Amino acid sequence: MINVVQDFLDEYNIKNKKVILGFSSGPDSCALAYILSKLAKKNNLELILAHFNHNWRGEESKSEEIFAFDFAKKINARFYFDCASKDETKTEENARNLRYAFFERAMKEFKTDVVFLAHNKNDNIETAIYRIIKGTGIKGLCSIAQKRDNFYRPLLNITKNQILEFLAQNKIEYKIDSSNEDIKYKRNLIRKEILPIFEKINISYLDSIENLIKNAILNREIVENVLFEFKKEVLVDDTIEASLYKNAKKPLRYEFLNDFLGEKLKYRNYKNIKKIDDFIMNTNKTSQISINRELFLKIRKGKIFFVKHNNYEKD
């Protein structure tokens, strides 16, 4: 595993840097913290363990916070910490938003652009399954990226069992989050009740689904290149040229809409993409359609664009 992480550092040329590690006190982040501490001198890295207390589990959360502080001292790393307010909404989505906002603050505090996260191969598979169940396309099938913006995941090809074996061999302590056993959280339900069924069908299901993810990434790269060229033609200042859009073939139109709506429409699926495309293709005059509670799509003078509901009359 140490060699895997060193290869990752070489691939992304991460040398002579301050490296922030999202540290939960769980097995994955403890393994990665230990490995990075062993590689720090060779790569001239300054390691910072960043621990965010979501404040969901009372004394258990507090004990993880103390453990994180002590672990940082043991491996000669710096420690950065924050705690969520008790009034915060206790949902997985809000917890994720708070956590990433915390990482952004950490990057500003330490003046770096590198945050390591300890997602593993099992996490990647669970994310892909979750997205399939919720409804996704090729982009969603790509699952968790090894690198996205300033966030790096060097353990993404390492299984949970490999991590646990590494911890045992090196006598590294870690904490277990009791909420990981609660199947009211969807990812826990997938991990504890759905994936064991997959294993009965194919004992190598992790590798099989990982291959699906890798194929999706390759296919998505082709799609991204085609989309890039199409957007240069059809999109001007966030406004779509209707005639150029209508001349494109349906698969390209659908893929373009899905991409274009990315920041505007959080929940997208084939059904609502088809609804928007049908409206555009069958409208030749000034018209509009409500996309959600916030947005209209409007066609006027051969242009397609979006306006907020409260700005529509003004427009």
Image (tube, rainbow, N blue to C red):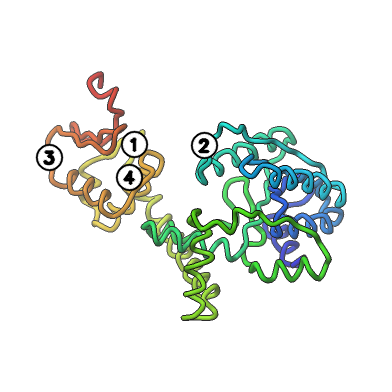
Q: Amino acid at mark 1?
A: Val
Which of the 4 image quadrants contains residue 32? Answer: bottom right
Q: Identify the amino acid type marked 4.
A: Glu
* Towards the viewer: 35 or 194: 194
Residue under the point 52% across and 36% down: 89
Q: Please give the name of the residue rendered at 58% of the width and 59% of the height, measured from the top-left corner.
A: 181
Q: What is the secondary structure assignment of the residue under circle 4? A: helix
Residue annotated with mark 1: 236
Percent from the top left, x then y, of residue 40? Answer: 83, 53
Between the C-alphas of marks 1 and 3, the distance is: 20 Å
Earlier residue among tags 3 and 4: 4
Label 2 belongs to which residue?
Answer: 89
x and y, in percent, of residue 5 in the image = 73, 62
Tell me which amino acid carries mark 2: Thr
Gap between marks 4 and 2 measured at Cα: 43 Å
Q: CA distance from mark 3 to mark 2?
A: 45 Å
Pointer 4 local density, CA inside 10 Å: few below 14, some 14–19, many at least 20: few
Quadrant including the N terminus: bottom right
The C terminus, quarter of image: top left
Residue, disc 3: 284
Pick the front one: 146 or 184: 184
Answer whether labels 3 and 4 touch (C-beta < 8 Å). Answer: no
Q: In terms of sequence position, does the residue under pointer 2 or pointer 1 come before the other?
A: 2
Badge 2 vs badge 1, beta-carbon distance below 8 Å = no
Categorize mark 3 by other alpha carbons within 10 Å: few (<14), some (14-19), many (20+): some
Looking at marks 3 and 2 on the same chain, the residue that comes earlier in the sequence is marked by: 2
Give coordinates of residue 115: x percent, y percent.
67, 46
